[in-house]
């Protein structure tokens, strides 16, 4: 339930960028911030890669990136693109021929790293392939693979070197009259990433893909990404995001959406507001939330649910959510609907009951949205 229209201090004013297309997904301009992930299967294992793409798409991924390290992967990419429900970005490193082959295979976007793709002549050939096959391009600058001349100039990876690398590559694309591109300037260091992204945001109107590269495992990487990406998004910077975790790509998508949801930038699925639990709790809050997160994964409709263990904050939180449950002791609690106390429910039946109420509310919201169209 959004209150942004009466709370201007919650407004985020997004940086104005020009819009490009990644397949059928608009990126930049006034388009929603797209959530992206990357497969970690062998690309040559078409069945496993397609299954991972489909799982990511089901979790909400708008775009999925697939690595194309060799010619066999280029050949597999054609079938992967054909079976994918979302646009596929081909991840290209070291050999420019892979970029050309990926464009021919139907990739919606080519991710190329200016630090290792080759000289300008080879980049031009990739640009021509992208133009011929209606691909966009992502310039992927990475602190770990900056060009030798920039490392010699600056002595080490720094924001200035990363921005200069990105602008040099932008110049090549623009000199070849190619403008369907976005850019990223990633580092594993949050401060370096943030400074580089601020610099590139000021220097170009190209759409920006956000990421903290090699962020770490599920917990540490989530925290690192939330701090780095969250601050940039709060500043209005970012048109697509990828949370890089040493974890299942589906988890990257979930974390990406949670970051956007926390800032009111995207709304998808059930936003559960729950307490950490304490001695006052009238039921097992932690186990209840774990169960509800699992059982409500199928809900795509944006809505809010509060699960609070006692009456200290429970009623107040329930006033601002679509469905709520507040523990009251004596083996039962109060169910709230649309911010109002509705009826009591026993603790042993409340999970099934809350799932029913959420599904019912989601159906109502979907019907109202269809009627409005």
Image (cartoon, rainbow, N blue to C red):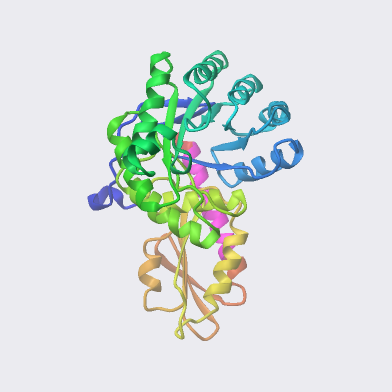
The relative height of residue 303 versus residue 198 in the rendered view (above or below) is below
Q: Is 124 placed above or below 152 here? A: above
Q: Quadrant of residue 337?
A: bottom left
Q: Position of residue 233 (x, y in %)?
A: 35, 46
Asked whether the viewer can see residue 336, the reply is yes
- Residue at image position (40%, 54%) is 262
Q: Residue at x 61, y 51 (%)?
A: 298
Where residue 162 sits, quadrant-wise, is top left
Would residue 48 be found to the left or right of residue 339 on screen? right
| Image-based side of 247 in relation to 223, left or right | right
Q: Position of residue 372 (x, y in %)?
A: 44, 36
- Residue 143: image x %, image y %? 43, 43
Residue range corresponding to the magenta coloring: 354-370
**Where in the figure is residue 69, as x and y percent of width and height?**
65, 33
Front residue of 261/161: it is 161
In-image side of 56 versus 165 (left or right): right
Q: Is residue 251 above or below residue 219?
A: above
């Amino acid at each position: 339930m959004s209150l942004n229209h009466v709370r201007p201090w919650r407004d985020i004013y997004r940086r104005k960028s020009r819009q490009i297309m990644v397949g059928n997904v608009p990126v930049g301009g006034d388009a929603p911030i797209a959530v992206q992930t990357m497969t970690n299967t062998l690309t040559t294992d078409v069945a496993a890669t397609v299954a991972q793409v489909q799982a990511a798409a089901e979790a909400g991924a708008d775009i999925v990136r697939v690595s194309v390290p060799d010619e066999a992967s280029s050949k597999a990419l054609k079938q992967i693109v054909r079976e994918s429900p979302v646009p596929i970005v081909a991840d290209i490193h070291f050999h420019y021929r892979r970029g050309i082959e990926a464009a021919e295979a139907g990739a919606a976007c080519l991710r190329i790293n200016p630090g290792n793709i080759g000289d300008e002549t080879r980049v031009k050939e990739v640009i021509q392939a992208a133009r011929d096959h209606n691909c966009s391009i992502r310039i992927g600058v990475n602190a770990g693979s900056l060009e030798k001349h920039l490392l010699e100039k600056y002595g080490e990876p720094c924001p200035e070197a990363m921005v200069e690398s990105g602008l040099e590559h932008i110049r090549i694309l623009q000199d070849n009259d190619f403008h369907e591109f976005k850019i990223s300037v990633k580092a594993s260091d949050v401060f370096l990433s943030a400074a580089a992204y601020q610099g590139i945001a000021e220097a170009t109107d190209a759409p920006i893909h956000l990421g903290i590269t090699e962020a770490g495992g599920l917990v540490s990487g989530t925290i690192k990404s939330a701090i780095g990406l969250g601050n940039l998004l709060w500043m209005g910077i970012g048109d697509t995001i990828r949370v890089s975790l040493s974890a299942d790509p589906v988890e990257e998508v979930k974390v990406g959406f949670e970051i956007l949801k926390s800032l009111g930038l995207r709304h998808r699925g059930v936003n559960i507001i729950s307490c950490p639990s304490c001695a006052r709790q009238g039921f097992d809050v932690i186990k209840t939330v774990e169960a509800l997160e699992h059982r409500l994964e199928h809900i795509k409709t944006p809505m809010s649910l509060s699960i609070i263990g006692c009456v200290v904050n429970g009623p107040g939180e329930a006033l601002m959510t679509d469905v709520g449950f507040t523990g009251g002791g004596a083996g039962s609690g109060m169910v709230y609907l649309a911010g109002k106390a509705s009826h009591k429910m026993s603790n042993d039946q409340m999970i099934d009951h809350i799932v029913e109420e959420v599904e019912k509310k989601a159906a109502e919201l979907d019907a109202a949205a269809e009627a409005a169209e």
